[in-house]
Structure formats: structure tokens, C-alpha cells
Image (cartoon, coloured by chain):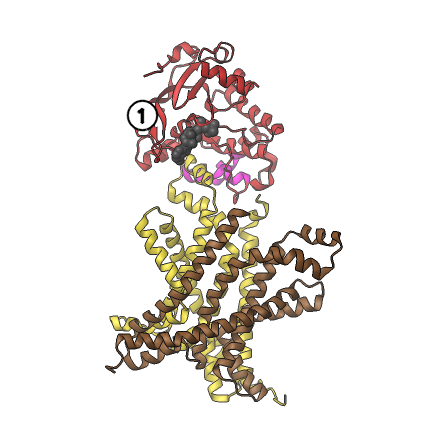
Amino acid sequence: MDEFTLSRIFINLLIATKWTLILSLIAFIGGGTMGFVIALMRISPNRWLRSLSWVYVEFFQGTPLLLQLFLAFFGLSVLTGVNLSPLQAASIALTAYTSAFLGEIWRGSINAVPQGQWEAGSAIGFGYFKQLQLIILPQALKLAIAPTVGFLVQVIKGTSLASIIGFTELSRAAALINNVTLQSMLIFGLAGLIYFVICFPLSNWSQRLEKRLSYTS
Amino acid sequence: MAYSQPNASQAGTATLGLEPVIVAKDVEKHYDNGFHVLKGVSLTVYKGEVVVLMGPSGSGKSTFIRAFNGLEPYQSGSIEIDGIEISHDKRGIELVRREVGMVFQQFNLFPHLTILKNVTLGPIHLRGLSKDEAEEQAMELLDRVGISHQANKYPGQLSGGQQQRVAIARALAMRPKVMLFDEPTSALDPEMVREVLDVMRNLAESGMTMVCVTHEVGFAREVADRIIFLAEGHLVADTTPDDFFNNPKEERIKKFLSQILH
Amino acid sequence: MDYSFDFSVIAENWPLLLAGAWLTLRMALLAIAFGLIIGIVGSLLRTSGNRILNGIVLAYVEVIRNTPYLIQLFFIFFGLPGLGLKLTAEQAAVLSLAINFGAYSTEIVRAGVESIDKGQVEAGLAIGFSKLAVFRRIVVPPALANVYPALVGQVILAVLFTSVVSQIAAQDLTYTGDFLNSRTFRSFEIYFTIALIYLAIVWIIKGLAYLIELHFFEFAKYRR
Ligand SMILES: Nc1ncnc2c1ncn2[C@@H]1O[C@H](COP(=O)(O)OP(=O)(O)OP(=O)(O)O)[C@@H](O)[C@H]1O
Ligand SMILES: [Mg+2]
């Protein structure tokens, strides 16, 4: 027990933080890609695509992330017979979760571009996808940046729940060390501090982006 | 002091009862940033008088009129409303405010309350009227300003002119001893200015004591008993409308008049 | 896929699930109520003009918003006993949820209050209302209307967050699922059903929120 000096605890937590960041990155890239598809489906002229994406978003926004992790980890393996590692299951669940939220955020940004912009695009003679690509998305992008960065913070915090299905990232490392040393306040305080150091700059950046946007518009 | 305090009696109030309602003496105010906005302004408003306050933008009109109900604290001098000093204790200010009605440039009706409830809110909670009494009184007042048929609408459903008339009714519902108006028609579309000025004119005829910041020359000429002119925090003139518009002495007043009379 | 679904575990254990859902709802309601009080007081302190109080509240808000709820829960449940403060799992759950919801609602309520024009306050004061009465009667109702969607969204997130308290063995809906899973290994059926129960709760909240909006915020339709 004596071996768990403050510096050793801290180093162990930092090592685990790497996995928090890797999982966040996977979720963000995977979720961003799928979220883009979801956003396009949500605004699609096709009713079926719209309904399908609506059900998807309702499910992943209306149920706890923890349950989504359980479904990916326990549920998928009994369904498919393939055993997923905690990292694989966490990646799948967090990607789905992230894509639902980013899809909604981006749909909102696209809808915030005035209807007249679509009309101007079609007046020039562009088809649907050209209008989207050349006129709508560049404008929507500007609106989307701040809330997207803000949501990245939610993703990073969300990865902590992967600890519950046994993926050893920062939170699980803290819980494991806690089991041995029982210095709960110190250990969870340190873990919280590490999360804070990662998340706070992002939150701050997002808020500044939002302010700048509201000044310019 | 560069400007002498004109004598109220020479300004055509001799016919009135000479019972002072507002007595402001040597009011000095600096804003927090150090800006010296009121430089020893004195003014007495008598019962039943209509006083119009004019002056260039930034001269301190709003600051001065808002000091009459304690919305702007000041550093020295004194202001008495109906004999009660606007003290700096909270409770005292709240009591004085009940006796002073205020109408703002931006109407400031409460968006979450119907027109009727905007008018009954104060009387019910501060004057102890029952709901029925307050509503009866409110309907009378709304009738007077020509809005009684809209009593159950929300402010957002009314035009600016209608909202301002409601705001006047709301202030009157507290049965104030004096009414303050800070540019009540400046935020209105031109076609709505008249309906508000008509209400104010009727109010003046009913004998209400009024202090109005306004640049409506017609109103000032016809309704005002006195015109007060503020410039750079000084009271520059206190005189009759006739004297003010037809016989301006100060260069600054001449310049001001040439601007507002086009 | 040759998996055969068997939902009998749900049919046989629905009273357990209902009890779990009931505890989830109770904890969420308590936490939201306390959290809202924290939010109102917090937003008042944030806007009080007192730098120290504002700083303290801001630090609280930022710490909570930038750390995972799981860590907050563990900090309170495992950490506080070290200070001689023993909490049951449910107490720790409600306390941590309230602290978490309080931080978010502080910022939401503050945004609402700041969205109200200064002229509204002055009009209230000019009638003769005290500052507190102006806040309660004139500032809060339209402020709430302005941030109502954000507040409802946060309430829903708080309800979904409660699932995490299963990890300190508070016997909520998710905990009940874990329990059934360990006995029957019908993982998919159990967790999918439980997810749907959460979804149903979320929909009920959305429905109620809509009714409340119709009733209390009718005026919001007419605002410029
Ligand atoms: N809170 C404040 N802090 C500092 N200076 C202020 C503040 N409020 C007003 N002032 C300044 O005080 C001066 C007088 O303001 P006030 O609103 O009383 O003028 P006014 O005569 O009503 O002008 P207007 O005709 O434009 O309404 C202006 O120069 C203004 O910039
Ligand atoms: Mg002014």
C-alpha cells in the first residue's frame, strides 16, 4: 500500500488518460461521420429517410448512455455470438450516441440557414446536392462549430461510463486505485482534475466561439 | 454659478394652487465613471402643473426625471415628493414610488401578463385592492385610454401606441400624485404619436400634475404650463411655452429650437 | 443470426422493474427540485455584483460542467465518509444529482434572467415593488419562458443520468436490469426493455412539458 505514493497514483491516472483520449477520438470521428449522414437524412426530402433517422435520434438521445453501453457490450454479443472487447463495445456505443447528438446539432445549423438561400441556389440552376454543398453547408459550418466543440466535452465526459463495462480508462483506473488505497477524495479529486484540465479549455473555446458568432451576426 | 435659478412664480404658475408636489434642490449627480451629469439642478413642480423638460441629447433629462422616483441615485442636494424626501433607504423609496407614476419610452409592459393584469398588478399587491375592485378600476382606466376592448390580450398583440396607452393606464392605476413621462412617443411610428398625446392631453386637463420629457412641440405649446430647458447638466431656462418658443434668449435654446423645428 | 428472443424474463419480473423505475423517478424528481433551488440561488449570486460570490459560484459551475458525473458521484459516495459523513447510496445519488443539475440550471436560469430587459425591472420598481417582488413577479416568469426548452432538455438529461447511480448500488431501474441480467443472462431483452422504459419516461416528460408550456407560457407566442 505504501507504494501508492501521490506521484505514482498520478502517473497511473495519466497513463489511463491516454485511453480516455483515444476513446474520445474514436467516438468523435466515428460519431461525426455518422452524424453527418444522420443530419442529411433528417433534412432529406425522402419521408422514409427522415422517419428512420428520427427513430435513431430519439432512441440514442432518449435513453441513458450507460444502457447503450450495456446493449453494445452484453446485448450485441449474445445477439451475434461474437464477443466484443470493452474497447470495441464502447467505441460502437459512443459512436452511435455521438452521431445522434451531432446529427441533431448539425441539422439545427443547416436549418438555421435562411430558406431563401436554397431558393437562390435553385434559381441559379443548382440541383439539391449542389445547393447543399456549395451554398448551405459552408454557411451551416460556421454556425455548427461552437456547439460541436461544446459537445466534444460531453463525449469526453461520456467516455467515463466505458469504465463500467470494464474498459480501463481514467475513471476505471481511479476506481481500481481507490479499491487498493481507499483514499477516495484524493483519487477521485485527482481524476476530476485531469478531466477538468482537458474539458475546461474546450468549453471555454466553445463559449468564445459562440460569443464571437453572436457579435458578428 | 454660471446660471441663475429662475423664479417659478415668474413663469406663469401664479394661477395655480402653489402647493408643491416635487421640490428638487441643487441635485448633483456623477455616474460611476465620473461623468458629471447633473450640476446642481433645482426645480419645483406645483400641484396641477404640466412641466415639459427639453434639452439636447445627453443633457441629463432622463437622469433628472428618473431621480424623481429614485431610479437614479444622486450624490447631493435633495428631492421631496409631496413633502416626503426621497431618502436613500429602500423602504422609503418604495413608498414614494407608489405616489409617482412613470411612463417609459419603451413602454415596458410586462409581456407575461394580460393588459388587464398589467394594470391590476400594482393595486392588488401594493394598494391592497381586492381583485374585483382592481379590475373594475382597471377597466375604467383602460376605457379612458381607449383600450378596454383589448383587456384580455397580451402586450405583444398590441401596437406600440396601444401599448403606451396601457402603460399610462398602468401608472394611473396606482392613483399617483404626479406622472412622469420620459419621451413617451419617441419609440412610436408617426401615426401612433397622436393617440398617445391625446391621452396625455386629457390627463393634463383632468388636473394631473405632470413632468414630461418630450420633443413634441405642439404638445409643449398647447399643454405645458412651463418649459424647462436643460443643457449639459444645468437648468438653463424655466419659462412659459410662449416665451420659450417665440422669444428665446439663450443661444443654446435658439440652436436647439432650430433643430427640432427644422 | 439464429438468436431466439425470449422476453419472458420481462414478463415475470415487471414488478421489480416498476419498483426500479419508481425509485429512478423519485430520485430524479428530488434532485431536480433541489437542483432548481441551487440554480435559482446560484444565478442570483452570479448576478449579484459581488465578485467573490460570483467567483465561487462560477468555479462550482465550471468544475461540475467539466468533469464526468460518474467521478462526481464516486467523489461524494466514497469520499464523504472519509470526512465522517456517511451517506446511503440513495442519499449520495440524490445529493450528487442535485449538485450536478444545480450547476447546469444556474447557467440556464442566469441566461434567462439576463435575457430580460432592464426596462422591465425599472417598470416594476417604478410601480413601487421591492427588488425581490420585481424578481419574482416580473423577471422570473418571462425569463423561465425564454429558457424553458433548455431547462426541459436538462431535466431529461438529469433523468437519464440517474442510471449511473446503479454503480453505487442504488436500486434504480438500471440496477434492476443488472440484477436480472446476472440471474438470467437475457442481456439484450433486459437492457433493450429498460432502455425503452427510459425512453417512455422521456416522452412523458416531453408531453408534460408541452402541456405546462401551453398553460403557463401562452404569452410567449406573442412576443416580438
Ligand atoms: N449609466 C451611465 N453611466 C455613465 N454615463 C451615463 C450613464 N447613463 C447616461 N450617461 C450619460 O449621461 C448623459 C445624460 O444622459 P441622459 O440619459 O440623462 O440624457 P438625456 O438628456 O435623457 O438624453 P436623450 O435625449 O438622448 O435621452 C449622457 O451623456 C449619457 O451618455
Ligand atoms: Mg433620455
Question: What colour do you see for chain B?
Answer: red
Tell me the residue at 53%/17% (across/down). Answer: B258
Q: Where is residue A121 in the image (x, y as percent from the top left)?
A: 71, 53
Residue farthest along the left direction in this orientation: A2
Q: What is the chain letter for disc 1?
A: B
Res. B28 in view: yes
- Badge 1 crowding class, 10 Å Cα cut-off, few under 14, some 14 to 19, many 20 or more, is some
Magenta span contains residue B124? yes
Magenta highlight range: B115-139
Report which residue position mark 1 lands on.
Answer: B78
Q: In this view, does A158 lie to the left or right of A79?
A: left
* Chain shown in brown: A
Name the colour assigned to chain C in the rendering. yellow
Callout count: 1
In the displayed structure, C156 sits above or below B171; it is below
Task: Answer above or below: position of B224 versus A204.
Answer: above
Prevailing SS of the magenta stretch = helix
Image quadrant assignment for residue A136: bottom right
